[in-house]
């Protein structure tokens, strides 16, 4: 177990709360009609994002999915710019062009949120390959869901990453469901990722995705392995989304007992208990929560008061020259 | 005669065919127990059972490949791709296998299958969940292409697609799911390759598809009321077979043609129609053929930009007035 | 071990010889320029095709690759029509439209040769699914190569076939090479198929693909399992192509010792030795060989003297109505 | 100045860029140790080492996805797809990821990459290994498209593609691999978006691409010799950017336009050009715009049928004479 000082623990707690409150408010804004289109919240899965982000070096790369608010935020993307993107404002991190499913901040090495299942696994491997060719020492971390383990790109990326011994950590956030269908209905094995690892010459690593210390520890080990040049890891983090798959989905297809059981294992509540049992005063933890809440409200105000994107930007940034001309 | 939404019409059309023919089955992601993420297949599993209406893993190559194999062995399967954008994840199966196998085997293999998919923009979903891809399918020899604009056409074309012995890519437009229309009771069976003249006029012919049909109709209305220009509006309904007769008659009658495409400009279906008219009816034209399309860009997520990108009635009106 | 009578053994021997001689002459015709485009020969891999074809019921379905002459022939497709297709004549099984890579005879349930790696695995699964829905009792058998185990469609098809417990037997003909690259260079496991089986809840079945009796036996067992409703099998048959990958490829990228070693394990020579050791007279075996040779020559003569396809057929059979009209 | 085949020009162009910039790397199936199944990459691994020129598994989604990821992290990668038909097996990565990521991220991500692929028919390979798919790529906003017709353009456009900061799909035509041409020594760098006028004439403009350029030139020669018709032949060289200036000037000068496309008819690049001319230069036209294409069918394998399918000089001549 990587030994952690109190400061690190408080950072992890703060990170999870920032993500939690960000998502909670995002959901409210969606129901208000201020966030349009769709959202896929990471509520309940914060420990995975927080544990890995805390263990990564600043120039390590994150590749995530449409369920990527947590990951992008915790790599350090400015909250106003993320909220601005969700509200489709010119202050948005992608200028409003990406929306909830495509949050990206390359300045923080948050290399994109990908909305088509599986596509970003080979992309993450490619970025890791470039790191080896260029000798940058970077590691790619690629987050995806349980359902993603059944698409071809998963198989192709895992095989190639291992054969080329690339510095990439594949993290399957197993939240037990695809959209509305349980993963158990569509795989013949128990663990969608871990039980496939041997097909790629890897050992299946399973971690309690609701225990941020455990995630932090696995992150350290797998990142270190990658940096030592020993190639990829495939981590399966067992977790659960508190809400539905997306938008206003109430998630009614999930048995009540299952939901209760998992809500009782809320990664943030669990961690608060652990921290208090270690003698950290609740008042301090409360202040962290209040600060996070204040930060989110400030980000919302900033986004609400921002303008819509300039109509002229419709035709910008198709090409590297900034424009969109297809003829001459 | 009942009012029904475009969304409900999808399930109605599928149910009509499953009722009629036990060889009709349907698979896709979340289509069975959950009734589809757009609720277009609600009630079908309860009604026809888990063997005929079945959920799949997230494996589009498997979904489409299995639909192809099932069609080779006596079924008339329907496969759903949740969003048309995902056609790209199984394009080899669709464009190289399903489309070409009959021809390459000298006619030995018949593939009576339908691939249904939610298509189009306007939902603020961003560049990877908003594309209008009818032209992708139109460009592939061996695929038929349907894209209904009304609830009654959803039912009729679904029936025609299921009964057709060739592969049909069936585009259901997200923006139209909530649209309502009258749908008579009893069996409804449409025809692939028959455009619908939605309005007749003398001055200009406007050709549209799917969600662009209401846009064209709104434009025609404005043109009539505000500019005294009377337009014929043709809803193509299917791109393959293509009702060139209707288009050429429209051009002959009005001497003007404007196409309204939701897809980005280059190589869209409107280009094909424009080239057919340029080749076969140039002497009928009193003005250049104009295409109103989404610019050649990916679709942005945010509302004000997406609304600028997708053709609006105003842009169609402008195009018509450009040569009046 | 399925017990086999002498007649069955002689059939297997004859089958391998028919395939061998067919391929040998096809190669010569390619070098002569009579067979155009490309060919991918099954020379050396006949035991896999023969063993399975002999064990299959008449309405069981075969799905194979561009390296599919063996499989299509041994399911009973008329040799003249196959040779006619290779020579691009109107007598060709596909009227000349398919060519070497697309031999198909649906009347014999040879459901096609597929030229894009991996695509036919889900197709074979789908045909098997239809068999269960319709209760026909058919089994699908899908042949593919070692290199095919790294493409996404392999992964998607295996997973879905097992989850739906479909009557399909997946047969990987591991001939150690993709085109010019050894499979060992691109996978992190030893057995491209068998070592992936557990990812799909299957046991990895490995068979000596140059021992036709062993293949016949595995075929019996896996077909029976499928017919009992116990779902798919994944069989890895170890074999070797005697020639290059395609066309005039001399296969020089393969070490001489390796080639010699495998040529010494020629499935036909081995089987002849076994049959003779069982007391079957060599003269009888010679007669079988002569008959096969005569059949191939007759097929070649038939094809050579046939006409090119009627130009009108260019525009036929795009659609089920026999035509190719895209407009009305 | 050396004579060199189109095939050799591919390796020459890649070598020139790898020599210049250590960030240029190449991956694909059998491209390294074996030098490519078409021998277009021969000698590159020996010269630039196994880290920069690397063989992959048969995993097109991984090849293209890794090329994308590598481009995001400081390399200028070249990926090979052995046959353009295989673009379908990784179309999601190409059309949905590579093409759209810059726009969707508001310009944050730059993807300086090249996907090379052997394209086109005439080799008797049948329907799944013979397609001309430039129009698939042209239809996708965010992709640039090059399809050289001569050895010198192979080198020049390869250099331009590698140096370009946007994704370029680079189509190498199988039928042209053996074609020879003069290629000057020293660095050669072309320009994306500049068509080449191969012949100038007064009576008709013929627009072609890749293997259709020699076909168009043969037709122009026949027209001149046997019919006294002088044709301008434009080799587009790239479809995106599209040199509409050259096409419109040709139309203005000759009043007639014929496009020659190897792809099946519907939604081919010629349709786009025809629609542009119909929209912007209709009054310059003295005759309908004609398109000579492969019919809307998959390609057959056997020689006599394939030769009938792919546009020939005779068919181009006929098209021109139809309106003379
Ligand atoms: C190729 C593809 N197929 C289907 C979808 C639609 N879809 C979006 S999210 C999702 C479920 C993904 O499940 P999982 O991988 O477990 O991730 P989670 O949403 O649970 O985080 C599906 C089917 C998609 N985006 N891409
Ligand atoms: C998707 C795809 N990629 C590449 C190719 C080109 N190709 C044809 S055969 C082949 C090698 C296949 O190797 P394997 O699966 O071992 O079969 P084998 O040829 O050895 O029988 C390749 C790469 C293809 N046809 N399809
Ligand atoms: Mg999940
Ligand atoms: Mg092999």
Image: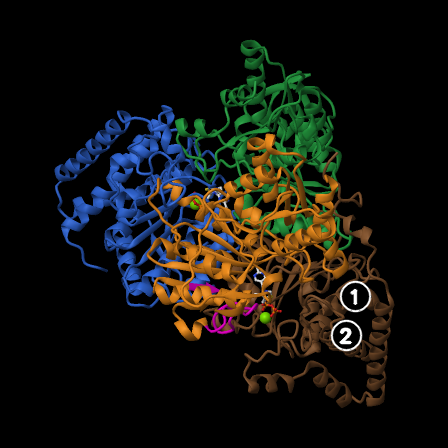
Chain colours: A blue, B green, C brown, D orange
The secondary structure type at the circle numbered 1 is helix
Question: Mark on residue A193?
Answer: none
Q: To which chain does the residue with label 1 belong? A: C
Question: Where's residue A251, x and y in %?
Answer: 44, 35
- The C terminus of chain C lies in which quarter of the figure? top right
Question: Mark on residue C82?
Answer: 1
For the residues bearing labels 1 and 2, Cβ distance under 8 angstroms: yes
Q: Is residue A285 above or below residue C105?
A: above
Q: Give the prevailing secondary structure in the magenta stretch.
A: loop
Q: To which chain does the residue with label 2 belong? A: C
Q: In which quarter of the image is ligand 4?
A: bottom right
Question: Where's residue A159, x and y in %?
Answer: 46, 63
Q: In the depicted view, which residue is nearer to us: B276 or C287? A: B276
Question: Mark on residue C22?
Answer: 2
Q: In the depicted view, which residue is nearer to us: D86 or B83? A: D86
Label 1 Cα neighbours within 10 Å, binned few <14 / some 14-19 / many ≥20 = many
Q: Specify whether residue D42 is painted magenta.
A: yes
> Left of C41 or right of it: where is A258?
left
Q: In the depicted view, which residue is nearer to us: A316 or A14? A: A316
Q: Specify whether residue B178 is painted magenta.
A: no
The secondary structure type at the circle numbered 2 is helix
Identity of the residue drawn at 71% across and 53% down: D225
**Any part of residue C1 in sight:** no
Q: Quadrant of residue B208?
A: top right
Say which label, 1 or 2, has the lower sequence index: 2
> Left of C197 or right of it: where is A63?
left
**Any part of residue D38 in sight:** yes
**Region of the chain picked out in magenta, as a range:** D26-43
Question: Where's residue B42, x and y in %?
Answer: 58, 31
């Amino acid at each position: 177990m990587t030994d952690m000082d109190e400061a690190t623990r408080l950072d992890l707690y703060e990170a999870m709360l920032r993500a939690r409150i960000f998502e909670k408010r995002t959901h409210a804004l969606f129901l208000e009609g201020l966030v349009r289109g769709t959202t896929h919240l990471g509520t309940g899965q914060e420990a995975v994002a927080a544990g890995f982000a805390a263990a990564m070096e600043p120039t390590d790369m994150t590749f995530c999915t449409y369920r990527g608010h947590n990951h992008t935020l915790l790599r350090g993307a400015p909250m106003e710019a993320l909220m601005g993107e969700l509200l489709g404002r010119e202050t948005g991190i992608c200028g409003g062009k990406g929306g909830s499913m495509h949050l990206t901040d390359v300045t923080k090495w948050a290399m994109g949120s990908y909305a088509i299942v599986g596509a970003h696994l080979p992309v993450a491997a490619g970025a890791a390959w470039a790191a080896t060719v260029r000798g940058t020492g970077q590691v790619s971390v690629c987050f995806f869901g349980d359902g993603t383990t059944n698409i071809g790109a998963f198989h192709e990326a895992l095989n190639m990453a291992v054969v080329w011994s690339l510095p990439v950590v594949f993290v399957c956030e197993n939240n037990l469901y695809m959209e509305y269908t349980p993963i158990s209905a569509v795989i013949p094995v128990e663990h969608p990722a871990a039980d496939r690892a041997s097909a790629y010459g890897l050992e299946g690593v399973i971690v309690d995705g609701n225990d941020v210390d455990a995630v932090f520890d696995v992150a350290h080990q797998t990142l270190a392995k990658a940096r030592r040049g020993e190639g990829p890891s495939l981590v399966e983090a067992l977790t659960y989304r508190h809400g539905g798959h997306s938008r206003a989905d109430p998630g009614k297809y999930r048995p009540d007992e299952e939901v209760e059981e998992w809500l009782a294992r809320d990664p943030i509540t669990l961690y608060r208990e652990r921290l208090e049992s270690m003698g950290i005063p609740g008042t301090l933890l409360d202040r962290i929560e209040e600060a996070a809440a204040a930060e989110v409200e400030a980000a919302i105000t900033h986004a609400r008061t921002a303008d819509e994107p300039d109509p002229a930007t419709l035709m910008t940034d198709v090409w590297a020259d900034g424009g969109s001309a297809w003829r001459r | 005669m009942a009012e029904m939404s475009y969304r409900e019409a999808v399930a109605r059309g599928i149910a009509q065919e499953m009722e009629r023919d036990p060889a009709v089955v349907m698979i896709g992601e979340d289509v069975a127990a959950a009734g589809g993420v757009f609720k277009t297949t609600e009630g079908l599993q309860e009604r026809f059972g888990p063997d005929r209406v079945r959920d799949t893993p997230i494996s589009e190559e498997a979904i489409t490949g299995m639909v192809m194999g099932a069609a080779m062995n006596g079924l008339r399967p329907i496969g759903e791709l949740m969003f048309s954008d995902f056609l790209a994840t199984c394009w080899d199966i669709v464009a190289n296998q399903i489309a070409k196998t009959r021809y390459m085997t000298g006619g030995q293999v018949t593939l009576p299958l339908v691939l249904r998919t939610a298509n189009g923009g306007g939902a603020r979903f961003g560049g990877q969940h908003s594309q209008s891809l009818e032209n992708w399918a139109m460009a592939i020899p061996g695929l038929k292409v349907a894209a209904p604009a009304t609830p009654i056409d959803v039912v009729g074309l679904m029936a025609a697609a299921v009964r057709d012995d060739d592969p049909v890519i069936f585009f259901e437009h997200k923006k139209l799911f909530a649209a309502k229309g009258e749908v008579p009771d009893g069996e409804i069976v449409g025809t692939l390759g028959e455009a619908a003249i939605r309005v007749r006029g003398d001055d200009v012919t406007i050709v549209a598809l799917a969600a662009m049909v209401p846009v064209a109709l709104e434009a025609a209305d404005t043109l009539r009321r505000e500019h005294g220009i009377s337009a014929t509006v043709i809803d193509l309904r299917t791109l393959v077979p293509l009702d060139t007769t209707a288009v050429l008659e429209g051009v002959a009658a009005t001497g003007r043609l404007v196409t309204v495409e939701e897809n980005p400009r280059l190589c869209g279906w409107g280009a094909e129609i424009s080239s057919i008219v340029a080749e076969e009816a140039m002497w009928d034209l009193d003005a250049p053929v104009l295409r109103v399309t989404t610019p050649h860009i990916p679709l942005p997520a945010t509302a004000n930009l997406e609304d600028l990108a997708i053709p609006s009635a105003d842009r169609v009106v402008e195009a018509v007035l450009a040569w009046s």
